[in-house]
């Protein structure tokens, strides 16, 4: 299969960035988009990344080689039966995999479905925040259970992404609770736990406050859907987070400097192991 025509369903930050990167790095491709949000549709048209930006799936033709579902997981599951007739292959980029994989296995025939997840994004939503380099050097996750054809893997590499394989959808979602979804909640909790007036905090805060709380600026609606879709793994992460926080609180309440040091050193060791693993990839 040679990819010639691509339809990106959802021209927001991820879809818009894909369109920009593909139009500039794979100019032989015809790349279209479908976007139901009128403001996003106008912004996407101004990117210069898409040949056409359709307002509805029914308006788009049915001869694409690849359709990319660049929408939240609930919308991806809902749209899947309608997208299957538009393209030979259907790939999603959702940050939770179990619901979409179950839907793909149910709705699509054989290996036509490609679950995937680019680990890229930023707080500014919509195509106005799109960047050609958004995926540069970032992991793009595929599942061993649903391997894509070589052409789709090559398309992802052309975006500058680093292809990563995980065993299956459940393994992916447990990883996301540790590496992304829980971290976002930790950022929210840091903001909610701040007791003083935020103007006073802003006046004196150093990099630690701004680095840790940056993720609290992310779009709320996306995270409501994402956390709900992965709630069992996120709840398990929250229990572990609460246990760690209780351990620090108990040590401080008992004025046990030795225990505080033990906890700090253990966290430092685990971070060092993560840094070492990242440097070998």
Image (tube, grey):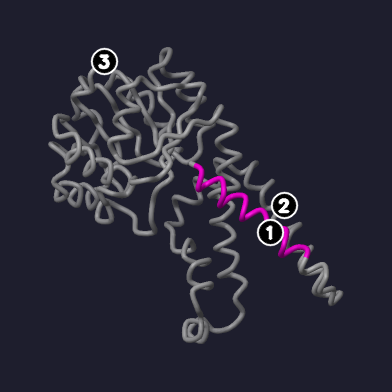
Would you call the spot at circle 3 few (<14 residues within 10 Å), some (14-19), or many (20 or more)? few
Residue 150 lies, with reference to residue 69, above or below; the image says above
Query: Which region of the structure is painted magenta?
Result: 262-280
Magenta stretch: includes residue 266: yes
Residue 34 lies, with reference to residue 45, above or below; the image says above
Report whether 135 appears left or right of 146. left
Name the spot of residue 93 as percent of width and height, x first.
40, 37
Report whether 117 appears left or right of 178. left
- Judging by the rendered image, the residue that carries numbered circle 1 is 267
| Mark closest to the chain's N terminus, 3 or 1 | 3
Q: Residue at x 62, y 55 (%)?
A: 271
Give the spatial CA distance, label 3 vs label 1: 48 Å
| Mark closest to the chain's N terminus, 1 or 2 | 2
**Along the line of sight, which residue is nearer the eye, 198 or 252?**
252
Name the spot of residue 237 as percent of width and height, x first.
66, 49
Report whether 274 appears left or right of 96. right
**Is mark 1 in CB contact (under 8 Å) with mark 2?**
no
Would you call the spot at circle 1 few (<14 residues within 10 Å), some (14-19), or many (20 or more)? few
Image quarter of residue 161: top left
Magenta stretch: includes residue 165: no
Q: Residue at x 56, y 27 (%)?
A: 167
Q: In the displayed orientation, state which residue is furthest to the top.
A: 110
- Judging by the rendered image, the residue that carries numbered circle 2 is 240
- Judging by the rendered image, the residue that carries numbered circle 3 is 1
Residue 80 lies, with reference to residue 204, above or below; the image says above
């Amino acid at each position: 299969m040679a990819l010639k025509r691509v339809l990106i369903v959802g021209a927001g930050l991820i879809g818009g960035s894909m369109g920009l990167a593909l139009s500039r790095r794979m100019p032989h491709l015809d790349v279209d988009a479908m976007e139901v949000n009128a403001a996003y549709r106008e912004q996407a048209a101004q990117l210069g990344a898409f040949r056409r930006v359709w307002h509805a799936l029914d308006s788009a033709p049915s001869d694409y080689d690849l359709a990319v579902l660049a929408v939240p997981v609930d919308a991806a599951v809902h749209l899947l039966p309608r997208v299957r007739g538009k393209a030979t292959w259907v790939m999603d980029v959702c940050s939770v995999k179990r619901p979409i994989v179950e839907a793909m296995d149910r709705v699509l025939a054989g290996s036509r479905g490609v679950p995937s997840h680019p680990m890229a994004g930023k707080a500014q939503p919509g195509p106005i925040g799109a960047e050609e380099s958004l995926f540069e050097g970032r992991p793009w996750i595929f599942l061993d259970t649903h391997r894509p054809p070589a052409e789709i893997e090559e398309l992802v590499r052309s975006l500058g992404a680093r292809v990563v394989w995980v065993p299956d959808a459940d393994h992916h979602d447990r990883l996301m609770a540790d590496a992304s979804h829980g971290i976002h909640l930790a950022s929210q909790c840091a903001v909610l736990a701040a007791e003083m007036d935020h103007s006073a905090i802003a006046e004196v805060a150093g990099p630690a406050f701004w680095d840790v709380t940056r993720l609290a600026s992310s779009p709320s609606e996306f995270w409501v859907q994402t956390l709900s879709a992965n709630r069992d793994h996120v709840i398990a992460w929250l229990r572990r987070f609460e246990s760690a926080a209780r351990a620090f609180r108990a040590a401080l309440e008992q004025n046990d400097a030795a225990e505080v040091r033990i906890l700090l050193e253990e966290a430092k060791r685990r971070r060092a192991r993560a840094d070492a693993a990242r440097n070998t990839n």
